[in-house]
Image: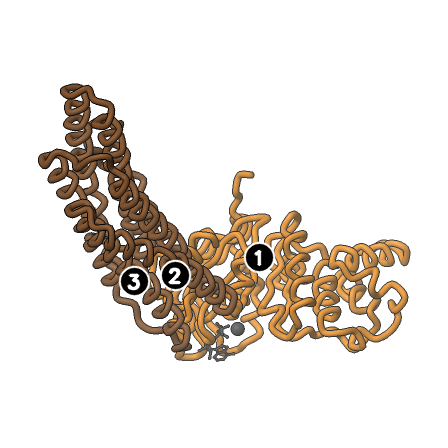
Amino acid sequence: MSESLKIAVKNLNVFYGKKQALFDINLNIFSNEVTSLIGPSGCGKSTLIKCFNRMNDLVEICKYDGEVLIDGKNINDTSTDPVSLRTRVGMVFQKPNPFPKSVYDNIAYGPKLHGMYKNKDDLDEIVVSSLQKAGLFNEVKDRLFEPGTGLSGGQQQRLCIARALAVNPEIILMDEPCSALDPIATAKIEELIEELKEKYTIVIVTHSMQQAARVSNRTAYMHMGELVETGLTKNIFSNPEHAKTQDYITGRIG
Amino acid sequence: MSEQSGHIVSSFDDDIASIRRSVTKMATLVEEQYKLLHHIIDTGSASTVEDVLENEPKLDEFDGKIRDQVITFITLRSPMAIDLREGLTALKISTDLERLGDYCKNISLRIQALEEIPPAEIKNEILRMTVMVQGQLKRVIDAYVTKNKDKALEVRNADAAIDQHYQMIYNQIIEDIKSKPNKIKTLANTKLLFTIKTIERAGDHITNIAEEIFYTVTGEILTTPRPKGESEQ
Ligand SMILES: Nc1ncnc2c1ncn2[C@@H]1O[C@H](COP(=O)(O)OP(=O)(O)O)[C@@H](O)[C@H]1O
Ligand SMILES: [Mg+2]
């Protein structure tokens, strides 16, 4: 499989007020791959992935320079509509955050908002197929009209993934998606990630080295707002080039 | 990156240190065995052969102990990068050390079973070859203890001299067989041929260890061919 560039980050600097959070980041992310971002808390992982769907626009003090290109197009151009950008670039957060609505309505929400369906049957079809893609349908098919918040933690997280899938994204960003889940629920999400990368480009922030090693093709190591090293996951975890990376993955710095 | 700072979880460092201690102790015992072997070749001492045989099971114990330590280490610590290499290398080195110990025992028994005392010039050359192996062993242990990749490379390069020496004694023994066609002599000389081949193989296992050390320290597998002494027999 020849690799094709999906997201290109070029000389990106991000500031929250006077404080600089990211320093001259250059990073390539490829289609149909899982890229994991690792690094100590506060190093800027969340800040970086929020640049991929302009979530930082919502933070008033946040300013940036540099470029983020998706399919070669600068997403910060005035011609890019942030709302439609966010349908192309879905996001799943650390804590599952289903809406206080039924399972069905959680999934239907996005397609309704963006008018992405023709009729009721069409919407039903989107809901069912999204739940199937997220590996959740069989577990909730009899509870579609019960509150999403009544599901288990792992199910809620897969519900949030289904919700992201419902609007047909190209890229899925996951910010520590398993940190609130038990090992079985985590394994289900990891299995899901493996399946999803066939169709989507996935970027995952994780604090678990083992998880990064298990799920990702490429890994980027960040430290204090800088991108220290990026490469194939198997190389990063077996023989990293930078001493800082090695110290982090082997538990020598916090 | 040879100077590593400690882990945040300090018992992680203790685990590695204790694996390294076992490997070093095992290697030191092998070194001791080769000292005894030298004495056996020199004097034919039966009691020294006993000593070698008595030490041998201790090497198997070390091998088992190191395997247990490494499995526990990998299971409980999920080591990455240099730490993982440290564990895996300990396993491979202990296998090489176990072989080295085995060879020592085999040679001792073979020497003891010799039909007659070898000619002085051949015996002296075999002793010299044993000293070379002892020196290599000492240097490879030093490279391991100090995590020194350059010392490991020196050991790897020096093995060619043992190969050359082997070839030289081989020719000498063949000449001896040709010059005095006598059945007893030929039997003894055949055992000597096996003996020197085994000593030469011991050198190869030391080279393996040197390569393992290089890999642990650098993460790189040596791909250049080992320097070779003349033809292979
Ligand atoms: N909304 C914000 N306002 C001000 N500072 C922020 C904001 N979000 C993040 N930061 C700062 O930016 C840096 C990077 O944070 P973040 O991207 O959340 O790191 P990570 O996800 O790697 O833990 C931190 O120093 C953090 O305090
Ligand atoms: Mg974060």
Mark 2: which amino acid? Phe
Q: Secondary structure at mark 3?
A: helix
Left or right, residue B14 beside residue B129 = right
Residue A50 in view in this figure = yes
* Rendered position, B54 above or below B173: below
Residue at horizontal 80%, vertical 54%? Answer: A129
The chain under label 1 reads A
Q: Position of residue A68 (x, y in %)?
A: 49, 58
Q: Which residue is mark 2?
A: B62
Does the closest atom of ligand 1 sit within 8 Å of the Cβ of label 2?
no
Query: How far apart are the two marked residues, 1 and 3, measured between alpha carbons?
Result: 37 Å
Q: Is mark 1 within 8 Å of ligand 2?
A: no
Type of amino acid under label 1: Val
Q: CA distance from mark 2 to mark 3?
A: 10 Å
Q: Quadrant of the N terminus of chain B?
A: bottom left
Identify the image quadrant of the C terminus of chain B. Answer: top left
The secondary structure type at the circle numbered 2 is helix
Residue B166 position (above or below residue A125): above
Chain ID, orange in image? A
Q: CA distance from mark 1 to mark 2?
A: 37 Å
Query: Mark 1 Cα within 10 Å, few/some/many (few <14, many 20+)?
Result: many
**Residue picked out by circle 3:** B24
Q: Position of residue B63 (x, y in %)?
A: 40, 58
Q: Are marks 2 and 3 in contact (CB under 8 Å)?
A: no
Name the secondary structure under disc 1.
helix
Q: Nearer the viewer, residue B175 or A252?
A: B175
Q: Chain B, which colour?
A: brown
> Within the image, what quadrant is residue A64 found in?
bottom left
| Residue A202 locus on image (x, y percent) | 59, 56
- Residue marked by disc 1: A215
